[in-house]
Amino acid sequence: MNKTILKSAFNILLVVGLLLIPRYVESPYALHMMILLFMSVAQGQSWNILGGYAGQHSVGHAAYFGVGAYTTMMLMHSKGVVPWVGVWAGMAAVVVVALIIGSICFRLRGPYFVLASIAVAEIMRLSAINLTPLTNGAEGILATEIPAFKIGATVVTDFVTKVPFYYIGLFLVLLTLAVTYWVQHSKLGYFFQAIREDQDAAHSLGINIALYKNIGLVISAVLTSLAGSFYGIYVGFVDPPTVLGLDVSVQIMLICIIGGMGTIWGPVLGSLILVPLSEALRSNMVTDLLVKIGMVNADSRIGIFLKENLSHAHVLLYGILVVLVILFMPDGLMGFVKKLAARRNREAV
Amino acid sequence: MAVFLQSLISGILIGGVYALIGIGLTLIFGVMRVINFAHGDILMVGMYLTYMIFTLLGIDPFVSVLITFPLMFLFGGFLQKVFINRVLDALAQNQILLTIGLGLIMSNTVMLIFTSDYKILSTSYSSATIKVGGGVSVSTPLLISFLITAAITAALYWFLLKTDTGQAIRATAQDRDAAQLMGINVKRMSIIAFGLGSALAGTAGALISPTYYIFPQVGSVFTLKAFVITVLGGMGSVVGATLGGVLIGITESMSAAYISSGWKDVVVFVLFLLVLLFKPSGLMGKSRT
């Protein structure tokens, strides 16, 4: 009992703290980092619902991320539809896409499902490249300004600073966390887990497999599309490789794999590791650090090589992390921590 | 009619190379039940290897196959022994993720070394063609690579059907446990199969290097194509992969000619989904439970 009170108190404090950050932190870079973190948690948590709880490891989530981002951006760019209306269109489009994908891919199992999910995402990417009149092809869509958010005539925010994005991002995180929590503690979540553990057993117990897989997919896809729309508007630019590429799908999945699939805190943990690491590489922080501590001379050949190349190396890092995690802690960090804790308990007894 | 014949011929020619890629993937799947998502990246490594041999030593890409094949075999054997071997009993998704990770490491390491610029390996015959008549012409490098492919495929069939090692590989693919009980060293067979699969992918990379752009991310296209080919042929079936490769080659060049080259990959993926839906065991696959 005491523990639960402590836990909820901690959670409330955490949320309040996060809500207050923009009041005291003015550095746009710090806020930018937080926004990236939020986006990553939201993406990971959305994937987690389908992949972690229902056990359907989609490697095609870029399809939902990209369709959400593209729909919102296309409507804003060509029809002048404001994003908070466009987001709904994005979600609607994604539901349609998800149901089509679900009806095809969920007839397949295991590796075949993975392959089909990749194929569908690739079809989306290639379509975005080829449907030039709609999507502006490989050039992508650049939004120069975002219309201000108005209720009636009063302007709520005009999106000039990063603060509104911070709150939208935080809202997304809380939303995905809430949905995951709800899934975990509802009948739906138990159905998902039954399907994950043994599909045939679940089926013989009378669970409608196709129905529940599709429900899981739609929930996961809609949340991913929200993250996608948020990405599009925040960055102001979408093109086929950055929102629909295979890398995007892998990245989304990776957040959960590293943190731990099928746990609420897994995607949070995964993001806390992945985002700072890849940002540190991208912004040349690592090279600067190596130079500062005197390990590398900035003007030497190695220094110049690192400076030029390490910023592209974050994907290499993803690769190394995946391999290490799969080989040495296949249940992700959360699983690893749990195992350590269990071992310590055993030793204590 | 000339357009039709032209696309049919170039489809078959490129299909030969696709078959090589597909056979490699299907061998690996057959013996280990592992879907190798790094297959295209292994092909990419083969392309860069060929490129280096060509620029540094001046050896023709088609001749350098003799060097690439054994080197890529060793590379594949190494990958199997160090990484893949550890996840043979793991969940399918973990195997998939491991190979995705390995692929990312390969493509990004190559990017660090060679930058992401497109490289072109231009030989004297890169854009040469042979006129066949009736308005139909055949690209010389494609024709040579097809002939080499056919020779390698024939040798491979001989190896799998007639030699002891080949039969042991097929036995392992049929039933791993039974093969082990019969005294076959399945661990070694796995290493050989992965090495062979990588060697075939690397060779395919070498063969297409005179006609394709060489860049670090080229692999993902071929990984996806390799899946389409193997699923179409039936996972684990070497004959199926051969047929599947040629079929995909023809489908691609036909849709490039009659629809548009931008949509040809979409056509291939749609075909892939249809096969998955209606005949998931593929053309030659036995339906498994």
Image (tube, rainbow, N blue to C red):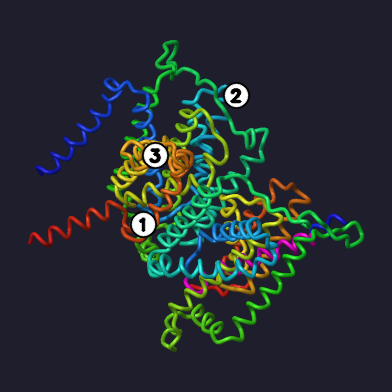
Q: Position of residue B85 (x, y in %)?
A: 41, 69
| Element marked by disc 3 | loop
Marks 3 and 2 sit apart, C-alpha to C-alpha, by 53 Å
User: What secondary structure prevails in the magenta region?
Assistant: helix
- The relative height of residue A94 versus residue B12 in the rendered view (above or below) is above
| Element marked by disc 1 | helix
Quadrant position of residue A55: bottom left
Residue depth check, mark 3 versus mark 2: number of the one nearer the observer: 3
- In the shown orientation, is residue B107 left or right of residue B122? left
Q: Which residue in the protein does label 1 denote?
A: A324
Q: Is residue A18 magenta?
A: no
Task: Kindly identify the amino acid type of the residue bearing the numbered disc 1.
Answer: Leu
Quadrant assignment for the N terminus of chain A: top left
Same-subunit check for callouts 2 and 1: yes
Determine whether label 2 and label 1 are within 8 Å by CB: no
Sequence-wise, the earlier of marks 3 and 2 is 2
Q: Which residue in the protein does label 2 denote?
A: A79
Report crowding for label 2: few under 14, some 14 to 19, many 20 or more residues within 10 A (C-alpha).
few
Q: Residue furthest right?
A: B134
- In the shown orientation, is residue A301 left or right of residue A136? left
Q: Which residue in the protein does label 3 denote?
A: A297
Quadrant position of residue B47: bottom right
Quadrant assignment for the C terminus of chain A: bottom left
Q: Which residues are magenta?
A: B8-32
**Residue under the point 46% across and 26% down:** A84
- In the shown orientation, is residue B3 left or right of residue A9? right
Residue depth check, mark 1 versus mark 3: number of the one nearer the observer: 3
Marks 1 and 3 sit apart, C-alpha to C-alpha, by 30 Å
